[in-house]
Amino acid sequence: MIDFNFLYIEFTKVTLMHILLMLGIPYIVFYIFEKVSKFDKFFEKWEAALFVFVFGALITLASINIQETTNIPFWLIYIYALIFLLVILIIIYFFFFNKKSKKRKFILIELNNQTRYNGLFCLQDSNFLKLVGTKKDPIQKINFNKEKNEYEKAINIEYAAISINLTEIKKIIG
């Protein structure tokens, strides 16, 4: 049994048990879910950390409150709540994100130096956009000829993937 006053402490008296319950175990559950499902929808790391902290705190608080009212052991409620969180994450992933991740479409990216790349959009984070190519449809680089003031014929790039800094991108046509 965990005391009802477990979460009502001063900031300077936070123990490893507080950190474990509110951050550690929820992070492990989310980390395993993220690795198994390839869920990478948080563009910034702080967003994922905030998600884990909020849900870890909610699960801990709810478990303590339910323990006080029903006399069910804290750990049993806590484990069931984590399993429930995992099931909800899996349902959200399969209904909203799984279908979109299978669809890969071609996009044309124009850089500030007027070079263009045509390839399959793979993923984007806060700093980079990633294009991939296949043997059948490789990434194409289209150079701008300043003398003729036109774009030259596409050159197939042998790279499997290219990461482009978002600050270098002038526009995306897709």
Image (cartoon, rainbow, N blue to C red):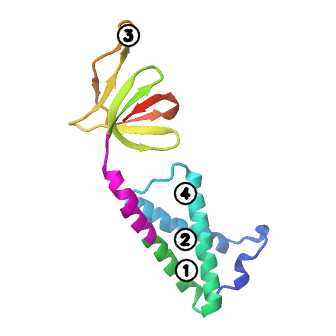
Q: Quadrant of the C terminus?
A: top left
Around disc 1, counting alpha carbons within 10 Å, would you say few (fewer than 14), some (14 to 19), or many (20 or more)?
many
User: Which numbered disc, 2 or 3, marks the residue that appears first in the sequence?
Assistant: 2
* Mark 4 lies on residue: 48
The correct choice, above or below, for 33 with respect to 46 in the image is below
Gap in angstroms between the C-alphas marked 3 and 4: 46 Å
* Lateral position of residue 54 relative to residue 154, left or right: right
| Magenta region | 88-105
* Lateral position of residue 78 relative to residue 148, left or right: right
Of helix, strand and loop, which one carries label 2? helix
Residue 73 lies, in percent from the top left, at 58, 89
* Mark 1 lies on residue: 78
Find out whether the residues at labels 4 and 1 contact each other: C-beta distance under 8 Å.
no
Find out whether the residues at labels 2 and 4 contact each other: C-beta distance under 8 Å.
no
In this orientation, does residue 36 appear?
Answer: no
Tell me the mark number nearer the camera, choosing from 1 and 2.
Answer: 1
Gap in angstroms between the C-alphas marked 1 and 2: 10 Å
* Mark 2 lies on residue: 25
* Mark 3 lies on residue: 149
Gap in angstroms between the C-alphas marked 2 and 4: 14 Å
User: Which numbered disc, 3 or 4, marks the residue that appears first in the sequence?
Assistant: 4
Residue 143 lies, in percent from the top left, at 35, 18
Gap in angstroms between the C-alphas marked 1 and 3: 66 Å
